[in-house]
Structures are given as structure tokens and as C-alpha cells.
Amino acid sequence: MARAQQGMVGAGLDAVLLTTEADIRYVTGFLTRFWESPTRPWYVLLPSAGPPVAVIPAIGAALMERTWVSDIRTWNAPDPEDDGVSLLADTIRSVVGSSARLGVPMTLESHLRMPLSDWHRLQAMVPSVDFTDDADTMRRTRMVKSEAEIAKVRHACAIAGRAFDRVPEIARAGVPLDRVFRQFQSLCLDEGADWVPYLAGAADRAGYHDVISPADDRPLANGDVLMLDTGLIWDGYFCDFDRNFAVGKPLAHVTSAHARLIEAVRAGMDMARPGATASDLFHAMDRVLGDGERSTDAGRLGHGLGLQLTEGLSLIAKDHTVLQAGMIITLEPGITLADGRILVHEEDIVIRDGGAEFLSPPASGDIVVLGG
Amino acid sequence: MARAQQGMVGAGLDAVLLTTEADIRYVTGFLTRFWESPTRPWYVLLPSAGPPVAVIPAIGAALMERTWVSDIRTWNAPDPEDDGVSLLADTIRSVVGSSARLGVPMTLESHLRMPLSDWHRLQAMVPSVDFTDDADTMRRTRMVKSEAEIAKVRHACAIAGRAFDRVPEIARAGVPLDRVFRQFQSLCLDEGADWVPYLAGAADRAGYHDVISPADDRPLANGDVLMLDTGLIWDGYFCDFDRNFAVGKPLAHVTSAHARLIEAVRAGMDMARPGATASDLFHAMDRVLGDGERSTDAGRLGHGLGLQLTEGLSLIAKDHTVLQAGMIITLEPGITLADGRILVHEEDIVIRDGGAEFLSPPASGDIVVLGG
């Protein structure tokens, strides 16, 4: 919070207004799965000096009182006539004044989690307040993790690592993919995940066609490559990495493509240190992936990670964010095989002084073989 | 879609612009857990006549091609210089024209899932387009479910019902609450859930203090009431209901409070038919709950349900939405006990001609007793 406030002062902001789960949790510690309900808006006003003020539905008061936030203002939500807007306007007036400069996250990867009509009403209620971009304060602050945050992501990664080690228990030729998905989520829970917000994957002959489709009931078959990619949560923090498995003996070009992906990860690791840019990491991996094979439509070869499955930076040619110690990112090279099928591999790392360190237990170049 | 387009014509809209998972899935059938990543915006333009147009990141093209949508325009996201905005502006111009009246969901329960700065850029790129409220078109259309949708929610409810029946396998005195949470999610998966986006609950002596906190590691103890409330997904549709359990022999006032909650659900069911209002259902249940006990800070006694855990209407005094056959809602009475602890019960129902029908297997008035 101190770093965010420093950024606000630098950007000439009197406060930032936060509306999303991740930004609000980052500042307050307010952790609940209740955000799954889109009904109620939640607001936190963080002044450039002093503690944050929560303006929230009454249903959240008991939990917010257990955080370090002491100034908690509530209304009975949902209220179709005034769903917290006038309370929020009053709070802005009393905490930062009627003519404050108030930042709102509004660039890449952000959204405003409140009804647009209430956003317009709020601006009309405090007409002298200058609502402006938060100058990337929240995104840049959250990108650099504390040791406590790094430990949580590492713990989440270890849970997923143990679950991946147990995939041979649940997946072999003949098992439908949707059953593999269900049982893999149970393995994650069994190994200690609090919940499993994200599981993607695919299985098809010698590669797959996309990595975001839900599972169907087609049984795994000899010659398939199965990929599972999980973003599980432990104590509010994500891991995000995948593993590929060969069902029965893999074809030679699958084996070599998988080895190439691991090689690309290593090239990313070699480049990953304070001072290098996101773009440098992209090019380091892209060079290994090679011409004509590099594009998988994913649009990037990795991203930031933390309170959200993806956050902060992207490993693309256009992202020139300079890496700093404490940043957690994924390395996620993909390769397109001759017939249009793809293979994707992903690991999680943290930038340290002078280098980087794996948070996920790194896979070897040899693809794991499941019973055919 | 036909009903949505009828609504658009009635409201004088040439198209609606959709940005959220639920609205986009409703129109296209595009089902993926990839929305967990906040990085990329997704757009669907639905004209008041004709098929929808998808303007989406390239990573989603393969999956979108498997839906009924044929006009799919993609860009390589994320792109920090132009993340689909000019492609979206071009699409608006070519599909509905430069001076269209374009609705966007912007009232209760909605949000705009795109960066606010891109929203401003889009408006500047098509200055003659009149961006306006969608006149509640999407919310009102989605509130009334088809038989196919009702069958999906019923299936999700049956899965959760079987998982609740198995709670005595995993919960008894001495078991930490966080282990109960993990194992209950595994039971849901084992019984057929695709995933478990929502699990809330609590356990404390003769009631609990709030219903949105994450689980801690306190072991269940004799005299506790354990509540588990799940929103699991089957084929893209939610259930949302809870069950209360007594750990060991329940105290008399817990037994009677639980029976009162079931009585309130029955009063809600008796009132639930086409022509009654959300407010009528609120008052019918509230009368049973009684003075001085009714408020639990939840703010409502039920809500709509479907593609989202909560959607559409709220059972509050101020919501005068008229019930129609096909609406799916939860009945969720809460009661505050003398010492400030609460008990909450929830069932899922569908409005039918002349009455209503349970989708969740309704609980009896007798609280289930777990091993003490």
C-alpha cells in the first residue's frame, strides 16, 4: 500500500477508487468467493495518505471487520434506487474533498466493476472531482510481489505439482476427457487447493487444436497428447502452469516438439533477470521455437501471475516492461506442428536479483507417458 | 435471441454490444473457463435483426467456430497499442452503420468488461453512434429460461443434492472446516459437477456469524451448526442452494429456527406463480420470519439464477418484477437468533403456469444431524 501511495503522489492523485476483487483484496486482505455473485458493487477508496475506506454492502461487513480496515461504511445492497452511489459520493467528499483528483484503473487488463449508469451518476454527484486514469498505479504496484506473496504462489505451485504427479492414477487410454478433468480437480483439492478456479486442457492425436475449450466425453486414445493447465488457489494466490502427457508411446515429432518447448523455457530462464524486458524474454523463447512454428494464436509467451490467473505484463514483442526482483511470471511457449496441431508448455518463475527461480517444479524434456 | 431482438426493436436500438461472459455465452453458446483471465476483452455485437458478430482475440477463434456464430473477427490480443478497439469500431460501422443507436447493459448487476480507456476510445472512433442503455434487454430476456436451460439447472441441482446427501461421509466433530470445504468440492465433482465456482459456508456454535467468509481450520465441535452453500456448474449452468447440519444433538432453538426457515420457503412457494411480484415473495417469507429476527444483512431473501450464480431479480421489498413462467429463482430466507448468530436456508425453484416447482431436492424441516 505504501508503494501504491507513493505512486499516487508521483502521479498527482489524491486517491484511487478500486472496484475489482483483486485490487480490493490487495489493499484490504478481504478474501471471499462471494465475488462470484455479480449483483453487488464493492468500493474501496485509497487516499494518497492514510488508511483505505471500504464502502461495501452490509453482507460483507463482518468479514471486512476481520481485516485491518477500520473505516467501513455499508448500505443494504441490492438497492435498485441507490446501490451505494450516494454513500460513495459522500465518502469521496469527506475523505478526499469535493475537488480531488481521483484515479481509477482504466488501461490494459482493467475494468470498472460497477454499473456504467452508476458510474455516470457518481460523476454527476461530485462534479468537481476529476476522475482520471490511475496512471497504472495499481497494476505496477501489484506486479512486484512481497516475500509473503511469493511464498503463497510457491505453495500453490507445489500443490499443483503433486496433483500433476498423480495424473497417471486417473488418466489412461479409454478414460473420457471430462472424467479426467473432474478427477484432476479432485486431486488438486486433495493435495491442498482451496479451490480450482481454472482448469483448461485438451487431448487429441499427437497434439491438440486449442487450449481453452471445455472437456468433452471422448475417451483418451493411444497416440493422444493430453494437456492439463490449472490455475488453482491457495490462500488467495494462483499458480498457473500445465503439463503434457503422451497416451501410450509418443510419436517422434511429439517428443521433439516437447523437448523444444522445454528448451524455450530454459532460454526464457537464462534471459530472466532484473533489467531485462518482457519483450527480451519473448524474443529469447521465440528464437528457440523457430520460424513457421511459433504462432499458436495465444498472442503471448507468458504473463504475470499472482492474485489473478493473469495480471501485469505480457511476454510479447510490444511489452517493454522492465523486469524487477519480485515479479512473478509464467513462461508459456507454444509450438504449432506441421498439421496445425499445437503443443503448449508453461512454468511459473520469480525474478530474483541476478536471475530467476522456478516456483513450479520444472518439467523435464521427456514427456510423461501414460498407460496406453 | 429472438426475444432479445424483439426487445431491441421495442426500445429503438439498432444493436447491443455485449462484453461479459454470461451475455456473450447466452447469445453464442461460447463456453470456456478462459474468462478467468482478465487480460483480453471479448465483444459480441448483436444487431436488432440478423445474426451476432463476434469480435474476439484470436486465441478464441477455434472454439467460437464450433458455435453457431459464423461472422468471427479476430485480432492478436493482448495488443497494448490497439486491443481490438479499431476492429470493433470497424465492425460497428459495417454491421449497423456509423449513426446507429447502440445499447450497452449499464444498469443493476451489470458491468462493462473492457478497459474504461478503450470504451472512451471506441466512442471517439464512432462519434455519431449513440451509445445508450440497452433498456434492460439482456437482463429481462435472460430472466425467462427455456426448457433446455431449466433442464440444465435441474441437473446441476441434482448433482449438488447428491453431494449434500454425502456430507455425513466427510463431516463430523473434530474435522477442520477447511477440510470439509475441500472434500465437499470433491464430492460435487464426483457426483458430476464440471467445476465448483462457488462454495461458501460456516460452522459455529448454534449458528454462524456470516456466510461469505472462507473456511478456517477450526475443527467442527459438538453443538455447531455447519452450513454449506454451493454454486456448482453443469454444462454452463449454476445451481445455488445450501444445507444446514447439526454437529451432534442440536439445541432446541436451532431446531425451531431451522423449521421456521423451511416454513418460510413454503410460504414463498405458495406465493410463487406468474403474476406475483418479487416483492410479494419477499413479504410472504418475511412474514413467517417474524419481527426482530428477519434481518441478516444479506439484503434479500432470494434472487434469479442461471448462467450466473445470481442474476436478474432480487427478492426485496423494492423489486416489483412480475414473475413469469420459466423464471428460475432461489428462495433464501435467513433468521437472526437472539445472540446475533444467523441461520440461512436456500432452495432453487422454477416458476410454472399456476405455481412453482422445486429444482433443488427440498430439505425437510428436520435439520440433518452429523456425528458428534
Image (tube, coloured by chain):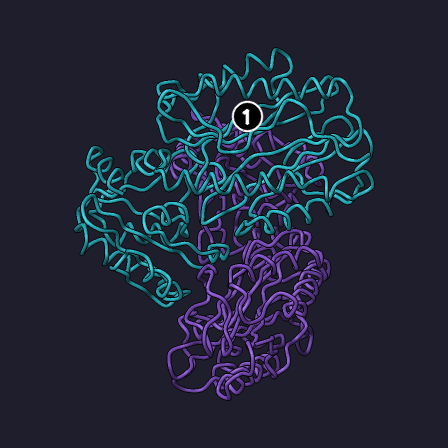
Chain colours: A cyan, B purple
Q: Which residue is mark 1?
A: A299
Does B26 sit left or right of B332 as displayed? right
The spot of residue A340 in percent (x, y) is 72, 22
| Of residues A246 and B306, the one drawn nearer to the viewer in this rendering | A246
Q: Residue at x 52, y 54 (%)?
A: B11
- Asked if B229 appears above or below B362 in the picture, the reply is above
The spot of residue B326 in percent (x, y) is 66, 66
The spot of residue A356 in percent (x, y) is 43, 24
10 Å neighbourhood of mark 1: few (<14), some, or many (≥20)?
A: some
The spot of residue A65 in percent (x, y) is 32, 62
Does B176 sit left or right of A76 as displayed? right
Labels in figure, total: 1
Which residue is farthest front? B174
| Of residues B78 and A302, the one drawn nearer to the viewer in this rendering | A302
Say which element carries label 1: loop
| Of residues B225 and B155, the one drawn nearer to the viewer in this rendering | B225
- Asked if B279 appears above or below B39 in the picture, the reply is below
Q: Is residue B14 visible?
A: no
Q: Residue at x 67, y 60 (%)?
A: B156
Amino acid at the residue labelled 1: Gly
| Of residues B95 and A319, the one drawn nearer to the viewer in this rendering | A319
- Asked if A81 appears above or below A221 in the picture, the reply is below
Q: Residue at x 37, y 68 (%)?
A: A76
Q: Chain of mark 1?
A: A
Instruction: State the image quarter where residue A307 is shown.
Output: top left
- Asked if B269 appears above or below A311 in the picture, the reply is below
Q: Is residue B214 visible?
A: yes
Q: Residue at x 32, y 54 (%)?
A: A121
